[in-house]
Amino acid sequence: MILAKNQDAGQYLGLNANLDAALRRILSGLDGLESGHYDMDGDNVWLNCFDYDTIPESEAFYEAHEHYGDIHIMLEGREKVCISHPDTLTEFERTPENDFIAYRGGAEHTLLLAPGSFLVVFPGDAHKIKMQVDGPEHVRKAVFKFKL
């Protein structure tokens, strides 16, 4: 897991070529990004931009991936995020064709994701997202997927 400021994305270059492509895109700026899917390098790197309203923690669940990492970037609004190792959670759904595993359980780490910062989660970093901070809030978010 990496939590950093957008302007510091360059500090993490060199870990993985696909991660590097996403970090360079963050460094070039995300202003004016419209909702939708942006193909960057086929199945290796892509970006999705979308809007939603945050939900109560009781309605959220953890997700993790085996082959892809995510970079979560809040463009507008804030959300609470919890991170836990899958060994501390209970799996309740697995969809291998979508590289998706869902879990329930308690948080080992909690953070606030707000504009100007990004969160990188790697395979094995179960993350519970979309949670309210001080009540419901409309957010605009960009999520990069990069293959490891």
Image (cartoon, grey):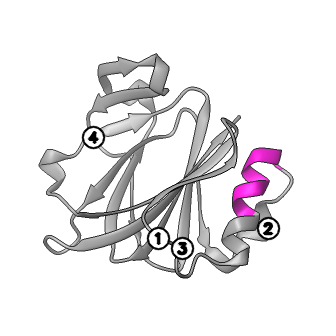
Please rate how many residues cluster around mark 4, counting C-alpha atoms within 10 Å: few if below 14, some from 14 to 19, many from 20.
Answer: some
Considering every residue shown, the one lying at the far right of the view is 14
> For the residues carrying marks 3 and 1, which lies nearer the camera in this image?
1
Residue 62 or residue 108, whichever sits in front: 62
Which secondary structure lies at badge 4?
loop
| Mark 1 or mark 2: whose residue is earlier in sequence | 2
Q: Is residue 118 left or right of residue 92?
A: right
Residue 107 appears in view:
yes
Q: Residue at x 37, y 19 (%)?
A: 94
Which secondary structure lies at badge 1?
loop
Q: Residue at x 33, y 39 (%)?
A: 62
Q: Given the image, on which type of amino acid does mark 4 rest?
A: Gly
Q: Residue at x 51, y 39 (%)?
A: 125
Residue tagged 3:
117
| Mark 4 or mark 3: whose residue is earlier in sequence | 4
Residue tagged 2:
11
| Mark 4 or mark 1: whose residue is earlier in sequence | 1
Residue 122 appears in view:
no
Which secondary structure lies at badge 3?
strand
Q: Which residues are magenta?
A: 15-23
Please rate how many residues cluster around mark 1, counting C-alpha atoms within 10 Å: few if below 14, some from 14 to 19, many from 20.
Answer: few
In whole angstroms, how far apart are the C-alphas of marks 4 and 1? 34 Å
In whole angstroms, how far apart are the C-alphas of marks 3 and 1? 19 Å
Residue tagged 1:
34
Residue tagged 4:
106
> Where 147 falls versus 35 (above or below)?
above
Residue 123, given in percent of the width and then of the height, sits at 57, 34
> For the residues carrying marks 1 and 2, which lies nearer the camera in this image?
1
Which secondary structure lies at badge 2?
helix
